[in-house]
Structures are given as C-alpha cells and as structure tokens.
Amino acid sequence: MSEPATLLRAVFGFDAFRPGQEEIVRAVATGQDVLAIMPTGGGKSLCYQLPALMRDGVTVVISPLIALMRDQVRALRAAGVEAGALNSGNTEEETEEVWNAIGAGRLKLLYLAPERLASVGARDMLQRVGVSLIAVDEAHCVSQWGHDFRPDYLRIGELRAALDVPVAAFTATADAETRAEIVERLFSTRPPQQFLRGFDRPNIHLAFAAKDSPRRQILDFAAARKGQSGIVYCGTRAKTETLSKALREAGHPAIYYHGGMEADDRRLAEQRFQQEDGLIVVATVAFGMGVDKPDIRWVAHADLPKSIEAYYQEIGRAGRDGAPAETLTLFGADDIRLRRSQIDEGLAPPERRMADHGRLNALLGLAEALDCRRATLLEYFGEEAQGCGKCDLCDRPADVFDGTEAVRKALSAILRTSEWFGSGHLIDILIGNPTEKVRAKGHEDLPTFGVGRDLKRGEWQAVFRQMMGHDLIRPNPDRHGALTMTDAALPILRGEDTIRLRRDTIAAAKARRPAVK
Ligand code: ADP
Ligand code: ZN
C-alpha cells in the first residue's frame, strides 16, 4: 500500500494536504467509519478518492449532483484512475462501459446517484462486485429538516448493513442537529469517528454594522477598496440594479446579477467578473455557485443573509487565494423582520421552520456578538478559536452596558399595550413623547410612559433591534409586525437573568465612517 503523501503527489499532483485531509484519509483508508465536516472547497473529495486507491476493491460514491459526478469521473480518468458513474444523465454507451469495467474487476471508484439505491438490480450488482467502502458526498441530504433532503439517502443505511463495509460521510453543513441526524441515519449501529476541520479562513476579516444609511455605508466600504474585485449581496433583485448604478456613479466599474436575468446575460456577467480586474458585482444569492475567482478581495452584504450557513458561504467567496480579504455585513431591524416573516410564511413543516428560526438566531447572535466574531462563528461550527485579531470586535471592543433594566422597560411597554404595537410607538411611550397616537390611545397614562428618558430614540432602536436579535421579541405576522414577547424573555422579565447589550451601535457606526473624497 502506497503512502498517502506519495499518492497525493503522483496521482493528484498536489504537494501538501489541506488542513484535516491527511488524518481523514488515514482513518478512511484503515477502514474506520468516518463523518467528516469540511467547508465547501476544503477538499472533501480527495478524502475518499485517495483512500479508494489505497484499498482493495471498489469504492462506491453516493452523490446527488450529476454534474459534479461527471467532473470528478473525468478528472480521475485523466489522472489514470479507473472511475465511472451510473446515473440518469448517462448515454447507453457510457453505462455499458461502466458495466464492462465492473465486470473486468478494474473499477476503483463507482459514482452512484442516490435513486439507483432503490433498484434491486443495482443492489444485487453491488453485492457481487466486491465493494470495500461506501463514500457519501453531501451527507446532509439525509436530514429531513434540511433544505436538500433526498429520500433515497435514507437507503444508504440499508446498503451499509447489506454490504457490511465502512462508510465515510462528508458534508459542509456543520450544525449540531444535522450532524446528529447524519449519525443516526447512516451510522445507527456504531458511531463514526468525527472530524470537523478547516472552517477557519484566517485571511478573511469579519465585520458587521447596524444599518444606518445603508447605501452610504456600502459606498464608503467600496470607496476604501477602489480598484479591487468585490461582491455586494442584496436581498432583492431591484436593489442590485439601483446599488450597482450608485456604485458606477461613484466611479466604480460595477454590474448587477440576479436570477431574473436571461441566462445569456447571467453568463456574460459571470464571465466579465471572472476575467476583468477590479469589477464589482452587485448580486442576489443567485450569484456565486459557478464562480471560482481566487482574488475576490471583499464581500459586502447590503442586507442580512438568511442564515449563518449562508453568511459563511457567501463571505467565503472572498480571498480564495489566501491573501487578505475583507467583509462587511449590514443588518437592521427590518432585515430581522423580513427574515422572520419569510420563514413564517414559508410552506415548510413546523419543525423545519423552528430549525430555520434557530439558524437565523445563530446569525443574529453573530451580528450582535460582544466579543470576537471569529470565535463566535467557529464555535457555531464546533471548532475552537480564541480572539482572532482579525475582526471588527478584536480591532475595537464593543461598548457594552448592562441592558437588563432597558430590556425590562421595553418588555413592560410591550405587555402594557397588549402586544399590539411596533417599535416606533413603543419608543414614543418609553421616552415620553406625547404624539397624537400616544394621546389617542391613552398611553400617556401608562406607568411606562416616560420611564425610558435616559436613552435617546436611536439608542432605544438599538435596544429593540438587539432584543429581536436575541429572540426576546418577535414581530407578529398576524398583527402587521406588532412586537410580541417570546418565552426567551421570561427570565429577564422575572429578574432571573441579566443581559448585556451594545451601546448604540448606530452612533458608533457613524463615528467610525471614514472620510470620502
Ligand atoms: P469540496 O468537495 O470540499 O467542496 P473539492 O473536493 O471539490 O472540495 O476540492 C476543492 C478544490 O481543491 C478542488 O479543485 C481540488 O482539486 C482542490 N484540492 C483538494 N485538495 C487539495 C490539496 N491538498 N492541495 C491543493 N488543492 C487541493
Ligand atoms: Zn476576532
């Protein structure tokens, strides 16, 4: 059996392993059950391709993406490895060739679409050909509450039992529930060895800012990085068009991209971004899948992404070359409201909606973090990290105060008005502003009226936003977004828990704004 490092060079042409690859390769090659979690682009395929070459017999690779399968088979063949795929996209000739290679005992890697597992013929075939390892790509597809659920993935457990061979499962989805579900469904009889590696991207600087004047904030960020390639992600198609126009008017080469464009126009935009230096693409999340540009120097979010996973994937497009890259993510109370209502109004079953709220909460926790963002982010993925020195909060610690009193006052205003009002009216009550609406509703007479005069309106806005971020309050979709209290707020209301808040992030963002010429 050749050494992994020798094969790495001879077959794949790489000089060194990426973080985590070598230990995973050794575990898989020696026949252990493995669940490996690595970020997209981290080099997961190598972790089963290389062991396949070190082991006798055939390695079956279950993969849901036909295009990806094809690419991998082509690349393996070009490197002199006998590999083939059985999927619905094959021509008869291709399928014939694969069967021949299997028959002759030459094949080392057999890629299978999950649908194949439903066919008795395919299962019989796998029993006969001497399978020595099952590799499962995109293993999170077994998760019923995830977004990529593939019912046929549930058959992998049976296949494993029938063949009695080790399973090596791979995914980039790292949240704890998904991991637990993969273990339960693929490894029910004995738990796998788990690896979680390579999520840190140390060259990417992380920063969040509360939305103040969002367009200005993005223009300033781009102005400080003139001439560099960057992506601005927006929440809506319309915004990609207006913001790219504003960037052009500010003297940047900028184009827009969204899913509503003709396929040809999208391809052209991708090509331009790939080839031109210093171009800015203002895009919806539709942009990025097919983009492999190593020198993207910055990524900005003009609106809050939908989950912590989406955030990670989107900022991860920056700095693939390893050189320093910067990110900025804007967020505001409106984003939180929008993301919540998107989840609530979606058609997903209740459990999945709960999980989606959880993923959004994780991102909001990162947005409202009080200490190192990288540590907060990596902790979510299960990796450890200390103060990184490369995030806005390491650069400049947050100005934190004990917000327990303020939060209790805000909750009291919400409860005394029977959870029927939005933050604007609630703040009027708190700061004792006798607007027409306040007087008409008789809210001047509430004991809460004016108890919050110690904070300015902007500071109260920051308090409400952070309360939403901590999921203490949620907009009620049936009451035009009136704020309601969640159970998470009860301990604070009862005086059993305290909460630290950041002081007026909005004012801080203003002070930090660099001068623009
Ligand atoms: P993933 O499936 O984790 O998203 P891939 O397996 O497709 O990632 O690998 C991403 C890219 O990294 C591929 O182009 C692959 O050839 C390359 N790659 C993988 N391992 C190494 C390595 N040790 N050194 C250099 N490049 C590597
Ligand atoms: Zn940090």
Image (spheres, grey):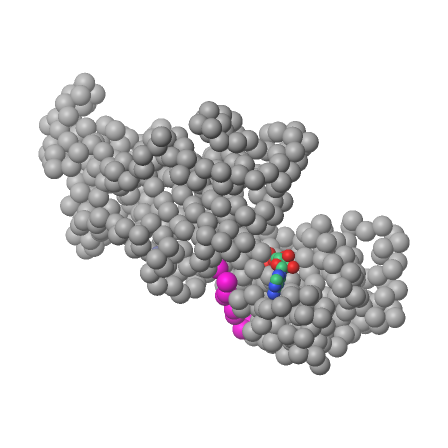
Quarter of the picture holding the N terminus: bottom right
Which residue is painted at 53% across and 63% down in the image?
37
Q: Is residue 147 left or right of residue 489?
A: right
Magenta span: 191-199
Q: Position of residue 452 (x, y in %)?
A: 14, 36
Q: Is residue 286 left or right of residue 361?
A: right
Q: Is residue 81 left or right of residue 217?
A: right
Furthest toward the bottom, the residue is: 1
Q: Position of residue 445 (x, y in %)?
A: 11, 27
Task: Say which quarter of the image contains residue 455.
Answer: top left
Asked whether residue 300 appears in the rendered view, the answer is yes
> 161 and 254: which one is in front?
254
Which residue is painted at 46% across and 52% down in the image?
324
Q: How many marks?
A: 0
Which residue is painted at 23% across and 28% down in the image?
425
Rendered position, 161 above or below 361: below
